[in-house]
């Protein structure tokens, strides 16, 4: 069948794998956005910059302190999350009583500052980061690089764990309750402001973790976040903002669709997600997994 | 209760501000136009034209954000899209400037209608993200389409004679054309806001469910506001092509959408003059800070954060608030 379409299976599976990896990043980033949006009602426009900070964190830890990839995988997200929580405590917190648009505008400004500072320091071109898992396995029909397989698996584990915590544990039920009625949850003796801070930190940490995972797969560059984040916003619109599962499924799904488009009609590969978004909006304005609002 | 001059009770005091407000506005408007008429003899005209193009763009954007409560994060698609259309029709198809402008605006109207149909189905933050994503789709289209010239853009767009009569290759002549376009666009927005249509838009901004329950077809009003805003943003983009003889990817990039939000925010959203002041401040800043390279991005971000955290009403909004406080104090005696 593949030969009939004139496309060798090697290329097809190669693009499929690439799509799956891109999808892994879409899923992790839109998941982080969904978690933050759920409790803070803020579209975190700094998300792309925080993803980039995660990657740079890994690069700096390696080049300045000699900490290898596996250490950075833990350390960098924690550091970026702490910076994120400081931002929430000092700036974001003061906007909750206002229109949600102000949160979007504030985080947009923060994104500009962070990207500008990194571009000033490191220039716009990318910095290389060595692959921590060289080599790969020959599956017969295709060659599977170890690191790429690791990224997909790691992302799936993180996504499913996050989903489990939020939808199936007591902590998650507090979170979901606080999104509905923060005053009531507060009355039950739960420290909602602290929960909000930690949730923001967690969402930011997810973005940074995606950044660390991206560092060896792509390059470390100050613009990596702003290039990716708009696609992620489209993923979020397609999936429907309220849904954790929606973020994960749509993220992976759209990555794969994008990869397939690259095989069959390369010209459309950068727009296919936005075209799908327009189509979905016409049929289901709330997104595929979202609830109408 | 009161001791001295405020012996006149409520009626004159209530009538006076409204009447005086209109007069002040008129006087201010005439003064402003007079200043703009002589300004190019003191200030570099190209700089002033750039300010006016962006001021019109920001005013068009403010019609949507400030008066209808819709934050579009994709207005660069109208600004940049019509810039491409104007540049292409004038340079390649040999249109005269007035036809090029018309083609640009027409394009924005059509694109605005299509984008509006899709985006007004969502509200608030969702609306912002949908417009952003649509604009990004348009950006990639412009990046790949042949007629846009890719990374190079469309350069050296000729400045033909306007209506075959007026030579706009001279900066000073073009300046008066741009001034006329700016005043026209500004008056269109002024009329729109101070009309029953504008009142309905404000009602939608304040309380959409109530506007619906009063029987207004809210979506039609929103769509009309969106198309009007797109058309004027397109007029600004097309005019910019005549000034700089260039249409490029910068005009359609999402950073441009962010810049127009910044201008409106700094000047004061929901005020008629705010976007003009904001555009002047930001364009001036960019001109003088251009040598600092990447710092410009950082400074813009800092202004964004300061504007959102500390002075949300913007320059003009704060001045209005102070003036109202003083008036309230005076009327208290």
Image (cartoon, coloured by chain):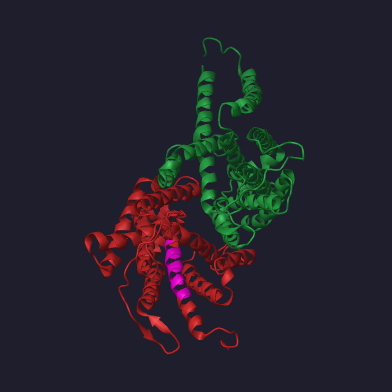
Chain colours: A red, B green
- For residue B305, which quarter of the picture? top left
Main SS, magenta region, reads helix
Q: Residue at x 34, y 51 (%)?
A: A121
Q: Is residue A19 magenta?
A: yes
The span shown in magenta is A18-32
Where is residue B326 drawn, in percent x and y? 51, 22
> Residue A223: in sight, yes or no?
yes
Q: Residue at x 58, y 69 (%)?
A: A268
Q: Residue at x 32, y 50 (%)?
A: A86
Relative height, residue B317 to residue A195 (above, below): above
Which of B325/B286 is in front? B286
Q: In this image, B188 relative to A165: left or right?
A: right
Where is residue B304 drawn, in percent x and y? 45, 43
Q: In this image, B75 relative to A101: left or right?
A: right
Q: Residue furthest right?
A: B164
Q: Residue at x 30, y 67 (%)?
A: A73
Where is residue A260 drawn, in percent x and y? 54, 76
Relative height, residue B302 to residue A34 (above, below): above
Which of A96/A225 is in front? A225
Q: Residue furthest top?
A: B4
């Amino acid at each position: 069948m593949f030969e009939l379409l004139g496309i060798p299976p090697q290329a097809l599976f190669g693009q499929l794998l690439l799509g799956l990896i891109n999808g892994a990043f879409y899923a992790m980033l839109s998941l982080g956005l969904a978690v933050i949006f759920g409790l803070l009602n803020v579209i975190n426009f700094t998300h792309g910059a925080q993803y980039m900070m995660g990657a740079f964190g890994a690069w700096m830890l390696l080049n300045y302190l000699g900490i290898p990839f596996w250490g950075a995988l833990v350390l960098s997200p924690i550091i970026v999350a702490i910076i994120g929580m400081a931002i929430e405590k000092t700036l974001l917190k003061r906007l909750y009583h206002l229109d949600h648009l102000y949160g979007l505008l504030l985080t947009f400004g923060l994104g500009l500052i962070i990207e500008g500072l990194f571009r000033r320091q490191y220039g716009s071109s990318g910095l290389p980061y060595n692959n921590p898992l060289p080599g790969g396995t020959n599956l017969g029909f295709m060659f599977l690089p170890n690191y790429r397989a690791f990224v997909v698996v790691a992302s799936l584990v993180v996504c499913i764990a996050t989903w489990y915590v939020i939808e199936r544990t007591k902590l998650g039920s507090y979170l979901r309750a606080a999104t509905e009625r923060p005053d009531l949850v507060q009355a039950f003796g739960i420290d909602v402001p602290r929960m909000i801070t930690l949730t923001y930190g967690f969402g930011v940490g997810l973005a940074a973790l995606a950044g660390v995972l991206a560092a060896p797969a792509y390059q470390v560059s100050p613009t990596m976040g702003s290039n990716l984040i708009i696609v992620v916003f489209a993923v979020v619109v397609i999936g429907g903002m309220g849904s954790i599962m929606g973020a994960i499924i749509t993220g992976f799904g759209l990555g794969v669709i994008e990869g397939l488009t690259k095989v069959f009609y390369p010209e459309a590969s950068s727009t296919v997600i936005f075209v799908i978004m327009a189509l979905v909006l016409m049929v289901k304005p709330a997104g595929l997994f979202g609830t109408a609002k | 209760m009161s001791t001295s001059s405020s012996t006149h009770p409520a009626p004159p005091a209530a009538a006076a501000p409204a009447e005086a407000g209109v007069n002040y506005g008129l006087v201010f408007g005439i003064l402003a136009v007079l200043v703009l008429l002589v300004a190019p003899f003191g200030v570099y005209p190209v700089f002033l034209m750039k300010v006016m193009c962006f001021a019109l763009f920001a005013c068009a954007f403010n019609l949507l954000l400030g008066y209808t409560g819709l934050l579009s994060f994709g207005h660069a698609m109208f600004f940049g899209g019509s810039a491409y259309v104007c540049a292409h029709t004038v340079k390649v198809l040999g249109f005269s400037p007035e036809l090029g402008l018309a083609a640009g605006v027409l394009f924005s109207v059509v694109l605005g209608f299509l984008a509006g149909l899709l985006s007004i189905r969502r509200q608030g933050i969702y609306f912002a993200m949908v417009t952003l994503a649509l604009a990004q789709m348009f950006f990639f289209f412009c990046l790949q389409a042949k007629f846009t010239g890719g990374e190079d853009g469309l350069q050296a767009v000729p400045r033909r004679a306007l209506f075959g009569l007026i030579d706009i290759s001279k900066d000073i002549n073009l300046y008066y054309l741009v001034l006329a376009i700016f005043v026209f666009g500004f008056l269109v927005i002024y009329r729109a806001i101070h009309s029953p249509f504008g009142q309905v838009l404000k009602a939608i901004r304040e309380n959409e469910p109530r506007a619906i329950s009063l029987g207004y077809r809210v979506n039609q009003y929103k769509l009309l506001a969106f198309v009007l805003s797109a058309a004027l943003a397109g007029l600004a983009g097309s005019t910019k092509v005549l000034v700089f003889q260039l249409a490029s990817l910068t005009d359609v990039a999402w950073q441009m959408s962010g810049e127009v939000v910044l201008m409106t925010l700094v000047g004061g959203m929901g005020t008629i003059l705010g976007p003009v002041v904001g555009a002047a401040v930001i364009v001036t800043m960019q001109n003088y800070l251009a040598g600092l390279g990447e710092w410009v991005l950082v400074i813009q971000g800092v202004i964004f954060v300061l504007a959102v955290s500390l002075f949300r009403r913007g320059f003009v909004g704060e001045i209005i608030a102070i003036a109202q406080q003083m008036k309230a104090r005076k009327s208290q005696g």
